[in-house]
Image (cartoon, helix red, strand yellow):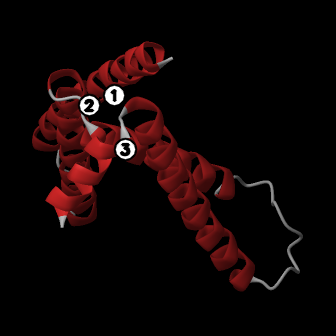
Amino acid sequence: MEKILKGMMRLLGLAIGVVGLLFLISCVAMVIILLRDPKDAVVILLGIVGIISSGLFGAYFLCVAFVVWQRFSPAAVHHISAVLALILFGTLIDRLADPRPILPPSFLGSLGDFALFGSCIAVSYLVFRLSCFMLNRALFPAQQIEAHVQLNR
């Protein structure tokens, strides 16, 4: 079971690394497009924000792939769980932004939207903590986890 989980984590790390590489390629493409045809200040500002966010996500995803393939440890499981929670959060927010309403329009107005946003954050965080706990318990003995926790303090 441990070998299967470790293999799945490495496969997931490889997929995350490929996505990180695609983020960095899109970052370069956005720079080229922005330099080739700047329109106005708002477009330039949004382009710069997009370039910075794509670059940061790409770099982080490549770091996660490196940690999973080179130094597989509880920290690697922590980073994989963080990326999965980030993907879950993005999916939930995308569903929240869907034009078809989840709740009736009279449901507390904007307060209902804030409640749904907060629940998306809470669900993502709980999935992150649960996946960290379960995968670390399955992949590493308790002594190694306790040593890792003491090193992070």
Tell me the SS state at disc 1: helix
Pointers 2 and 1 in contact (C-beta within 8 Å): yes
Evaluate whether residue 114 shows in this view. yes
Figure check: 73 above or below 97: above
Tell me the SS state at disc 2: helix
Tell me the SS state at disc 3: helix
Q: Earlier in the sequence, mark 3 or mark 1?
A: 1
The tag on residue 150 is: none
Viewer-side label of 3, 1: 3
Viewer-side label of 2, 1: 1
**Mark 3 = which residue?**
142
Q: CA distance from mark 3 to mark 1?
A: 27 Å
Q: CA distance from mark 2 to mark 1?
A: 6 Å
Figure check: 127 above or below 61: below
Q: Earlier in the sequence, mark 3 or mark 2?
A: 2
What residue sits 20% from the left and 60% below the top? 150
**Mark 2 = which residue?**
20
Compared across the picture, whether 83 is left or right of 126 comes to: left
Image position, residue 96 (x, y; %): 67, 58
**Mark 1 = which residue?**
16
Figure check: 79 above or below 111: above
Corner quadrant of residue 137: top left
Image position, residue 60 (x, y; %): 21, 42
* Residue type at tag 3: Ala
What residue sits 64% from the left and 57% below the top? 97
* Residue type at tag 2: Gly
Q: Between residue 1 and residue 117, name the one nearer to us.
A: 1
